[in-house]
Amino acid sequence: MTLLVHEIVGLADSSEKGMLVTFFCITGLLVTRWIFSGHLPLSNLYESFMFLSWSFSIIQMVPYFSNHKNNLSAITAPSAIFTQGFATSGLLTEMHQSTILVPALQSQWLMMHVSMMILSYAALLCGSLLSVALLVKILYVNERINFLQNTSFLLFRNYHRHQLIQQLDRWSYRVISLGFIFLTIGILSGAVWANEAWGSYWSWDPKETWAFITWTIFAIYLHTRTNKNLQGTNSAIVASIGFLIIWVCYFGVNLLGVGLHSYGSFTLTSN
C-alpha cells in the first residue's frame, strides 16, 4: 500500500510508528532472554529468527531516526511480520525454551560471527526485495508507456513512477552493499572460529558452501553496478536470484540437519 498509494500519509506514519514499537519490543525480548540464558540468544533457529526480525526493524530505524524518508518500510515491515510469525509458530515450539549452549557454540566468536551473518541476511533480503519491487515497477511503467505513448499527460503520469524506480534502485544498492560488508565479516570471522574449533578454516560444509555461493552472487551484483550498461534491470535480476539463494543458505540448509552447523537445524514432525 505504501508503494502504490503515496497520497495516504497517515498510512506511512502509522507503519513507521508501529515498526518503532516493534523494534523496542523485540529488543526487550532479546535482552531479557540474554540475561536469563547467560549468552547471546543466537543458539538455535528460533532465536536466529527473532534476531532476524529485530534486524529488519533496526534497518528501518536507521533512516527513521535520521529523518530520511524512504520506502524501506514497505519491505522491512512485512519481512519482520513474517519472520516473527514463523518464529512464534508451532513449528519451532521445542526451541522456545532457552538451553545451555552446545560445546561448539561456547566461544566468544558466537556474537561476532552469528550476529554479522544474520544482519547480513536481513540487509541482503531487504535489498533483494527492493530489487524485486524495482523489476515489477519497471515492467509496469514500460507497459504503461507502450499503452499511453500517444497521450499528452504521459510525462506527468509517469514522473512519480520514474522517481520511485530511481529511489528503489538507489536504496537497493545501498542496503545490499551494507549486507555484503556484514556477510564478508561474518564469513571471515566464521573461518577464524572454525580453525579454533575444528582445526580448519574451511570445510565445505553445506552452510559454508551456500554462504560462499551467496557471497559470490552479491559480488556479481556489485560488479554489475560498476557497469552502466548492466545497471537497472540486469543488476536487479541478479539481486532477485540472490533472494532465493539467501533463503537456501539460511533456512534450507537447516532442513537437511547435516554438516557442522546441524545444531541450528530442526525437523518437521508429524502426529
Image: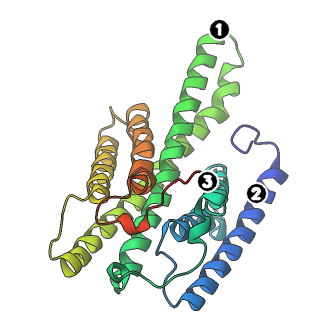
Residue position marked by numbered label 1 in the rendering: 150
Q: Secondary structure at mark 3?
A: helix
Q: Residue visible at 67% across and 81% down?
A: 28
Residue position marked by numbered label 3 in the rendering: 79
Is any part of residue 111 visible from this angle? yes
Q: Residue visible at 76% across and 39% down?
A: 5
Q: Secondary structure at mark 2?
A: helix
Tell me: residue 178, above or below residue 99.
above
Q: Distance of mark 3 from mark 1, alpha carbons?
A: 40 Å
Q: Secondary structure at mark 1?
A: loop
Where's residue 148, x and y in %?
Answer: 66, 12
Residue position marked by numbered label 2 in the rendering: 15
Q: Distance of mark 2 from mark 3, alpha carbons?
A: 13 Å
| Type of amino acid at the residue the image marks with label 1 | Asn
| Type of amino acid at the residue the image marks with label 3 | Ser
Res 149 quadrant in image? top right
Q: Would residue 50 appear left or right of 128 to someone viewing this image?
A: right
| Type of amino acid at the residue the image marks with label 2 | Ser
- Depth check, mark 2 against mark 3: the one in front is 3
Query: Which colour assignment does the render follow?
Result: rainbow
Residue at the extreme front: 271
Q: Residues within 10 Å of mark 1 (few under 14, many from 20)?
A: few
Res 109 quadrant in image? bottom left
Where's residue 154, x and y in %?
Answer: 67, 19
Q: Residue visible at 66% across and 35% down?
A: 160
Is any part of residue 54 visible from this angle? no
Residue at the extreme left: 199
Decide which of 227, 43 is in the foreground and name it.
Answer: 43
Q: Would residue 218 appear left or right of 155 to someone viewing this image?
A: left
